[in-house]
Image (cartoon, rainbow, N blue to C red):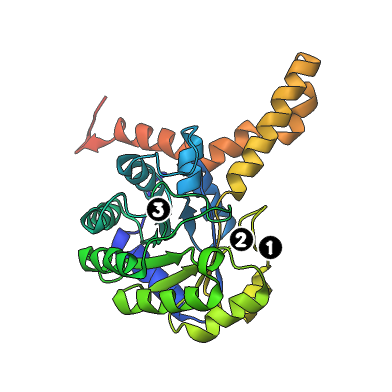
Amino acid sequence: MLFTNKTPAQKRAALRVQLDDGKLHQFPGAFNPLCAQLIDKKGFDGVYISGAVISADLCLPDIGIASLDEFVSRGRQICRVTDLPSIIDIDTGFGEPMSAARSVWLMEEAGLAGCHIEDQVMPKRCGHLDGKEIVETAVMIQRVRAASDARLDGNFCLIARSDARAVEGLTKAIDRMKAYVDAGADMIFPEALTSPKEFEAVRAAIDVPLLANMTEFGKSRLLNKTELESLGFNLVIYPVTTLRLAMGEVDRGLSAIIKDGDQNAILDRMQHRRDLYELLHYEDYGKFDQDLFNFEIGDTPVK
């Protein structure tokens, strides 16, 4: 049935192998567990859980209003349904360094393979918007060190995201990223780079795995897999893509119902019932129920 066949430890170990194999691994964003199951079925390398998407799903802006409990709950729900490693956004750690440590511990307990923490101040902003503010390097070092020390599984991947490129420029941002590595980050997430040359410069300066954010309508041109792999990046996320696709179709579909009075013109744009049931492993649940109530003890059927 629709539960993962791998333990969290196995999924974390799998992520570590991915980060060491020299290839680029694609982690689309999942806006719910059903979407995560489809990402798994399509053959992607992992699942990404975006803080912006969790917030939007709750009809909130991405400014740190959604709670730690809401993030943990969504992470746990998604990890339960996929054998792929999942990484989650924990914004600025939900408080002071001790809160960042607790956030990491709870994400590990929920089954996540890794998380990223950023160097913005609260209330934070979307990484591709103007007007961001960042904390002093020393403050982010405390966050990273606390988060790193909180891990019980050494394979849990701690990713340090820096929003400094848009605030201080690339050179100072790279200096920050190096300090975050020294503080215990396993991977660096340079947010809102503006050109392939900047991606290349970060790769030349940083000696741990790198994460690229290919979000739509942002500061970065949408680089394809081949480009990012040639630039030496290890992992790429598409954080809001699936939500944007889904909500775009919902918007168009609802407009069609208002216009036409029924759904007949939009049936070919919907997921068919049979495809949904296949994704849910619907028949497996029926078989499980049948087997449970038709087993035998010795020669006597149990009814």
Q: Quadrant of residue 238?
A: bottom right
**Residue type highlighted by circle 2:** Met
CA distance separating discs 3 and 1: 23 Å
Give the residue pinned by disc 3.
91
Above or below, 137 against 131 in this view is: below
Give the residue pinned by disc 1.
222
- Residue 10, horizontal then vertical, whole percent: 33, 65
**Residue type highlighted by circle 1:** Leu
- Residue 30, horizontal then vertical, whole percent: 51, 48
CA distance separating discs 1 and 2: 6 Å
Question: In front of the other: label 3 or label 1?
Answer: 3
Q: Residue at x 28, y 57 (%)?
A: 104
CA distance separating discs 3 and 2: 18 Å
- N-terminal label among 3 and 2: 3
Q: Nearer the viewer, residue 52 or 289?
A: 52
- N-terminal label among 3 and 1: 3
Mark 1: few, some, or many residues within 10 Å (few <14, many ≥20)? some
- Residue 209, horizontal then vertical, whole percent: 46, 77
Q: Residue furthest top?
A: 261
Q: Is residue 55 visible?
A: yes
Q: Residue at x 69, y 30 (%)?
A: 251
Give the residue pinned by disc 2.
214
In the structure shown, which secondary structural element does the residue marked by tag 2 occupy?
A: loop
Q: Quadrant of residue 102?
A: bottom left
- Residue 97, horizontal then vertical, whole percent: 24, 59
Q: Are marks 1 and 2 in contact (CB under 8 Å)?
A: yes
In the structure shown, which secondary structural element does the residue marked by tag 1 occupy?
A: loop
- N-terminal label among 1 and 2: 2
